[in-house]
Amino acid sequence: MKIKKLIILIVIVLLLIGGGIAFMVVSLKPVSKNTSEVTFEVAPNTSKIDIVKNLKSAGLIKNEFAALVYVFFNSNLNLQAGSYKINKANSTQEIIGQIADGRIIDIIPTVEVTFVEGKRLVDYANLISNNFGIEYNEFIEKCADKEFLQELINNYWFIDESILNEDIYYPLEGYLAPDTYEFYQNSSPEQIIVKMLNNLDKKLAPLKSDIEKSGKSAHEILTIASIAEKEAINEPDRKKVSQVIYKRLELGMALGMDVTSYYGVNKDMKEVITYADLIAENPYNTRNSDFKGLPVGSICNPSLESIKAAIYPSDTEYVYFIADIDTGKVFFFNTYDEFKNKKTDLGL
């Protein structure tokens, strides 16, 4: 009886192995008999997993899983960046081999660009316009393209329908991760945006669980972070600013943050702000006494430090603060009288 069970087990194992081999053979075959060539680009520092995903998205391989198995069982393969002409009649092994050998069309020049934290999307658009063959308005329009935005909502866990709000000035404000990047010089607006979003995804991934536990959406966390970024210049103060925001939301008070007033009237912090600006009605100006809650979206692209400050605010009970833009010093208070007296001392 035991021998019979053993034979059955061996047969099952052999069938599974045979089925797995058959699956791999079929899955690694060419997607077409058509010998037409398709241009496929591998950006610098793209992971093997992302290269395989992109090959599948481009319709150049049959099965993503089978291709990943092949790549990781051939761990010595070094997939190289570049622009490739790939024949659709080639097998997955041949295509991977071409990329591993670096058989590119030509060497595409790259450009290194640093996006400074705390800057607005319009500042990034100007920087992109100065470094690529992309017009300022072309980039701005891509950031507002509804079809493109819906794709992003579908592809990234931290992006939701909030960015489709008609009141938002720039839907992707706050989502373009500040950092130094290397791009191909012929990169499109979409490629630049996706690379920056992928970077934000990597930065937020370790924080995902805590964001979900915070009671705030990722959109709200980024909005709080963007305010903390503009109001304070160091981690302790940014955590306290975030705490004040949470406290005021809890109390049903207007946030009363000057930095939101600047953004609401499309002014840079170095520009003169008027009383009319401070009381203006718009979806960002929390200085307007009738405004309650958070702005409709971020007012800049915050640093990871500010994002963490928004997730982990300080354990304090401040309700008021005064930020000295010139010195970077921030003063925090529990009561309105303390706040008022300090304003008098500072001549504000």
Image (spheres, rainbow, N blue to C red):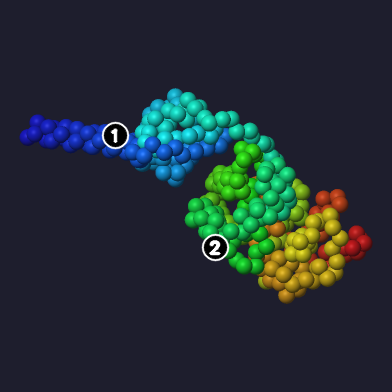
Residue at image coords 63%, 33%:
109
Residue at image coords 8%, 34%:
4
In contact (CB < 8 Å): disc 1 and disc 2: no
Residue at image coords 9%, 31%:
3
Q: Which residue is mark 1?
A: 25
In percent of width and height, residue 117 lies at 71, 47
**Image quarter in which the C terminus is found:** bottom right
How many numbered callouts?
A: 2
Q: Secondary structure at mark 1?
A: helix
Where on the picture, by quarter, is residue 131? top right
In percent of width and height, residue 180 lies at 67, 39
In percent of width and height, residue 254 lies at 72, 69
**Image quarter in which the N terminus is found:** top left
Where on the picture, by quarter, is residue 171? bottom right
In this rendering, the label closer to the viewer, 1 or 2: 1
Q: Residue furthest bottom?
A: 290
**Crowding at mark 2 (Cα within 10 Å: few <14, some 14-19, many 20+):** few
Q: Which residue is mark 2?
A: 161
